[in-house]
Amino acid sequence: MVVKPSVKKIAMERMQILIDNAISNARTNPELSQRQASLARRISTRHKIRMPYHLRIVFCKKCKSFIAPGVNSRIRLGRASSKSIRISCNLCGHTYRKIISQ
């Protein structure tokens, strides 16, 4: 199945709106934000569209749940020789790193 450009554009806009709403609702209503993020993920899988990096980073790589920075995840700067950011999911406990290029 080939995705039409108009369908792809609409799906990308909806994913962006859902993730933005999920981030803004993360503190006040965590269940709603989790639902909005899962809807965004479902849109990308249904239309076979790869989610852009800035939308993908709000999902845990292990349990695939929505993690809002500072709400249900912990972000720390790495102390190793390579500059990195460590993100820990408070739901499953998984920690992963993002290497910062210099």
Image (cartoon, rainbow, N blue to C red):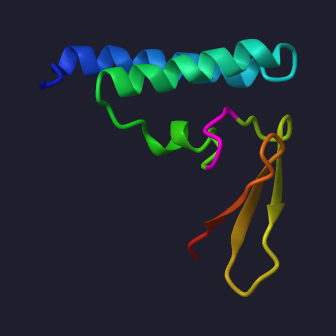
Instruction: Name the residue at the bottom extreme.
Output: 81
Quarter of the N terminus within the rendering? top left
Instruction: Report whether 58 appears left or right of 7.
Output: right
Instruction: Report whether 50 appears left or right of 94.
Output: left
Quarter of the C terminus within the rendering? bottom right
Of residue 5 and residue 45, the one placed in the foreground of this image is: 45
Residue 18: give x, y in percent of width and height.
Answer: 57, 17
Residue extent of the magenta highlight: 62-66
Most frequent secondary structure within the magenta stretch: loop
Image quadrant where residue 65 sits: top right
Of residue 93 and residue 72, the one placed in the foreground of this image is: 93
Residue 91: give x, y in percent of width and height.
Answer: 80, 40
Q: Is residue 78 above or below residue 49?
A: below
Residue 96: give x, y in percent of width and height.
Answer: 68, 61
Q: Residue at x 85, y 34 (%)?
A: 71
Q: Residue at x 25, y 14 (%)?
A: 7
Instruction: Report whether 22 appears left or right of 38.
Output: right
Q: Residue at x 84, y 44 (%)?
A: 90
Instruction: Report whether 91 appears left or right of 82.
Output: right
Q: Is residue 90 above or below residue 33?
A: below
Q: Is residue 64 magenta?
A: yes
Q: Is residue 81 above or below residue 41?
A: below
Q: Is residue 11 magenta?
A: no
Instruction: Name the residue at the left extreme.
Output: 2
